[in-house]
Amino acid sequence: MIGKRVLIAEDDAVLGFYLKQRLTELGYNVVLTKDGKKALQTYLDNPFPVVITDYEMPGMNGDELISALKTGDVEPVIIMITGNQNPKFIVKIMKLGIFDYIIKPIQDFEIAIKIKRAFEFHEMKRIEVISRKEQQLRLEGQLEWIQWKEKMTSIGKFKRENQNLFESLKHSFCQGAGFGALVSILKMVTDTSDFDGKFYKIDSELMELIQINAEMAEKSLNKFVEIDSLISNQPKLEIFSLKQLYEEIKTWIGELEPILRIQNHEIIVSDFNLNHSHFLVSISKDCFKKSFVEIVTNACKFSVPDSTITTILKFENDWFKCAIYNEPIVNYDGSKGIPIESENLIFEPFYRLSKSVFEKYQTLDFGLGLSYVDNCIKKHNGKISIFNIKDHLDWDGKPKTKVAFQLALPVQNETSL
């Protein structure tokens, strides 16, 4: 929890000491102030992601402090402490725009849970703001629409995509593990094996390498066939409400726990807006699940160990949008994230940014996975993009490069069916 800073505004010395001690024990970096004015000045000097404030304080009370804090691009997540249990009062303070409240006397388990959820909520809101600014700078909406429209309306696109697949496959036979290594090993077998008149004697280690690389080549060809089938045929689509799809995605994330454990990653998911329950999407569940799992697996492979992967799901302008953000490792050339010139190439078959093979993830590492995702989303009349965002609002104050992987599916209202 390094860098997870909490500001407390509490005029009761005993309660303030208790809160600071308890949160410090939980691993948070805590600053305690004794009134609203001091809390506001401390926040303005160095903004905090989470603020805990009492309601009744001298000089500047809780609601005045909250109003003053809600002026920046990314507001802090605010938790109010009060001894007033009157429902009308609770409604009043929630209308101030706070994240949650705690009734005195405070319970240890309650403060621990609510602080953890507050940081998760702040992370998602912060990334949404960063992404929105990045989209404005890139004119992303216009550029994505033009690129997508050109892809979808191009003449003979299926034929050309199949041609690209076969051309890439042909060139790939001389590269990487699997295809290229298999060719080299077979040459070694030819040079080193002994013929006894009936059988060839092959070194056992060479035979083991043949088996490993033949298996890799077979997996790659199977994935190629899967992509080719997806291009040539229309998958069977089913209707899901956005609520159902949200629940499905949470289930898929639960199944990815072994992948997350490899480098101790955590994944957080935005809450679902119940007002959007009646909107519908038509998807091939199997196809869309494979695509989602592929994106998250890629995020894990290329993320800094012990980092958080953020998934934001939302309905916006007749589209269901899924955005996955991760903090990338350094590329082999010293850069970070996705180079601008590679933002479209990343979906091409056999295109790879990294020269590494990630054996622990049991993936092919031939660049076929994102090609499958691209074709799957196009079969759903959807849009897909990947780009970098610059995060200037991290808790330690240092800007970080993050990779944003966004996909969107068209949405229908159930009343239109």
Image: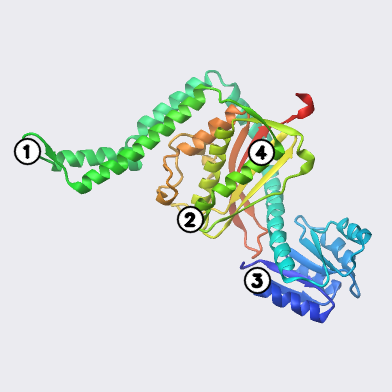
Q: Is residue 332 visible?
A: yes
Q: CA distance from mark 3 to mark 2?
A: 24 Å
Check disc 3 and report its element: helix, strand or loop: loop
Coloring scheme of the render? rainbow
Q: In the depicted view, which residue is nearer to us: 295 or 354?
A: 295
369 versus 399 height, above or below: above
- Residue lying at 55% horizontally and 33% vertically, measured from the top left: 287
Q: Which label number is shown at residue 262? A: 2
Query: As drawn, is 151 to the left or to the right of 18?
Result: left
The residue wearing badge 4 is 245
Q: Which label number is shown at residue 26? A: 3
The quarter of the rendered structure image containing the C terminus is top right
154 versus 410 height, above or below: above
Q: Label 1 amino acid?
A: Asp
Neighbour tally class for label 2: few under 14, some 14-19, many 20 plus, Cα within 10 Å:
some
Q: Label 4 amino acid?
A: Leu
Residue at the left extreme of this rendering: 197
Choose the circle earlier in sequence order: 1 or 2.
1
Where's residue 216, x and y in %?
35, 40
Tell which tag, 2 or 4, sits nearer the viewer: 4
Check disc 1 and report its element: helix, strand or loop: loop
Q: Label 2 amino acid?
A: Ile
Q: Label 3 amino acid?
A: Leu
The residue wearing badge 1 is 196
Query: As drawn, is 35 to the left or to the right of 250?
Result: right
- Residue lying at 22% horizontally and 48% vertically, measured from the top left: 205
Choose the circle earlier in sequence order: 4 or 3.
3
Where's residue 31, x and y in %?
73, 74
